[in-house]
Image (cartoon, coloured by chain):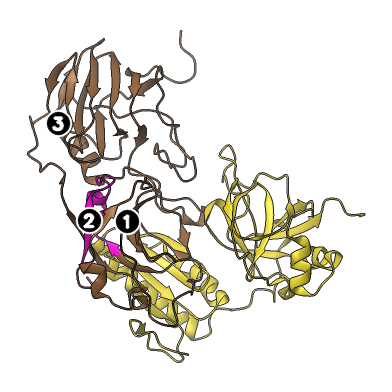
Chain colours: A brown, B yellow
Amino acid sequence: MTTGEPAPYALLEVVEVGALSLVQDLGRPGLAALGVSPSGAADRAAHALGARLLAQDESLASLEVVGGLVVRALGSITAVVTGTHAPVTVDDRPTGTNAPFLLHAGQVLRIGRPSAGLRSYLGVRGGVAVAPNLGSRSHDTLSGIGPAPLEPGQQIPVGRPTGPAGGNLLVDVAPTRAPATGQVVLDARPGPRLDWLADVARLTTTAWTVGAASDRVGVRFEGPALDRVPGRASAEVPSEGVLRGAVQVPASGVPVVFLADHPVTGGYPVVAVLTGRACDLAAQLVPGQPVRLRLLGTP
Amino acid sequence: MVEEPTGERIPGRQPTGRLLPYGERGLLVEVDDLHRALALFELLAAARERLAGLEDVVAGARSVLLVAASPGALTAVRAEAQRALAALGSGEVPTAFHSGGPAPEQVVEVPVHYDGDDLADVAELTGLTVTEVVAAHTGTPWRVGFAGFAPGFAYLVDGDPRLRVPRRATPRPRVPAGAVGLADEFSGVYPRSSPGGWQLLGHTDLALWDLRRDPPALLRPGLWVQFTDADGAS
């Protein structure tokens, strides 16, 4: 009766997409020699929390949602929403975040606009089962690698859950702190070009806001410019490797913090690098939100 | 050699590099020139086979960025970097790559239509005629130095040294896919349409990046590129 690919366990039919919804997992690290960024969930901790609440491996893909998403379940699906503080309803009945729930066949799940944070993660038991590219199901916005952004009418395959029927769901709800709505302080450690700054103290005393041009490539700060030491004022760095969390100071002097879809190399000085936890916090910043950096010692 | 104030000098027979901090799971190894960077990259890329905590090795023009899989793996990665620098400093690694030349199976032929918008500017900057620029670009094979910028983009090195030109003062908002350019000591081919500041010599019809191909990148470290004049007489 069937040929080729086995039929998916269940489907999620996309009804409405807010700003942008993407399939994401842990990305495709280790491919710099191909010029390919790691990509993957922008807020790793939120993606991973969803996987743990569903008692499954973090490598299974989830949906990264910005600006809301409405999906209809075709088949019964165990799901969880993590990341932002956002209204979540099933057939218009409120349900919680950070708490797994069952979506019966035909039910409509609506993730609204968050009151705190930017990126929600819709995890499903069995994982989002689109075909991988280069070992990952993540959509890389910089290169276009991976499954295309979600579109209304599209049907997203959900993988067959492993383990006992109903799963080993031992946790009803994970108590987590909602993303901050006020000023966020991002912890960073020194980067290779910290000494290019004329006044290192200004890196941690300057108050910036998050720019509207921020995306999965990077969080663009707005506000005061940092000065470089005399002699480095207009110098470029010969192309050198870039990592998630790198705080780059371009010619304008206003920092950019790279996120998951960062380029593999860059030509501006990297003065500091966010901790992994701070990268997750940075991924939840909304345009206009005040932000500062805190410099920790060398590990 | 001027020592960077934040750099950690590596003991050895001669100064060969500096270890610079790069957050909780990165380490930037900075060296003095491109060939040392490429030699170091080869040593450290090979180390990924036996060092599970080394998640990626990213080559740069004067540096190699080492990425540990976790903050806890950084100590082992740092030790590996010091070993590689010691090997580099004691002269066990060749720093010139033209001596042997490429094996035929390592050479990728890239036919180019030399019709780029900056051909005349490159001729003026180099003091060559347009015909001589094309002859120089196609005269000797280029080596894939390192990848970056975009999937499938390779920084090509070891070409004719007369072709060293600066980037354009103002980058173009859009450079078409397949555009072949020059910047500093590099040549390169844009895999997809993007902004760019390289001096454009022409374009190729080859696909530099194709996900249906395994591996998807046409030009990878270890390979050489022989540009040919697609519209030439031969």
* Disc 1 + disc 2, Cβ < 8 Å: yes
Q: Position of residue B146 (x, y in %)?
A: 55, 62
Q: Position of residue B22 (x, y in %)?
A: 33, 68
Q: Residue B56 is drawn in which quadrant?
A: bottom left
Tag 3 subunit:
A
Residue B170 in the figure: left or right of residue A152: right
What's the distance in space between the residues labelled 3 and 1, CA to CA? Answer: 29 Å
Q: Is residue A129 magenta?
A: no
Q: Three-letter amino acid code at disc 2?
A: Val
* Disc 3 + disc 1, Cβ < 8 Å: no
Residues in magenta?
Answer: A273-299
Q: Is residue A298 magenta?
A: yes
User: What residue sits 39% from the left and 62% below the top?
Assistant: B50
What's the distance in space between the residues labelled 1 and 2, CA to CA? Answer: 8 Å
Q: Nearer the viewer, residue A187 or A53?
A: A187
Q: Nearer the viewer, residue A50 or A69?
A: A69
Residue furthest to the top: A1
Residue neighbourhood size for the residue with mark 2, other residues' Cα within 10 Å, grouped as few (<14), some (14–19), many (≥20)? some
Residue B12, above or below A221 = below
Residue A293 in the figure: left or right of residue A222: left
Mark 2 or mark 3: which is in front? 2
Q: Looking at the image, tell me whether mark 3 or mark 1 is earlier in sequence order.
A: 3
Residue B48, above or below A15 = below
Q: Which residue is mark 1?
A: A221
> Is circle 1 on the same chain as circle 2?
yes
User: For residue A291, which numbered disc appears in the image?
Assistant: 2
Q: Looking at the image, tell me whether mark 2 or mark 3 is earlier in sequence order.
A: 3
Tag 2 subunit:
A
Q: Three-letter amino acid code at disc 3?
A: Thr
Q: Could you tell me which secondary element the residue under label 1 belongs to?
A: strand
User: For residue A97, which numbered disc appears in the image?
Assistant: 3
Q: Could you tell me which secondary element the residue under label 2 belongs to?
A: strand
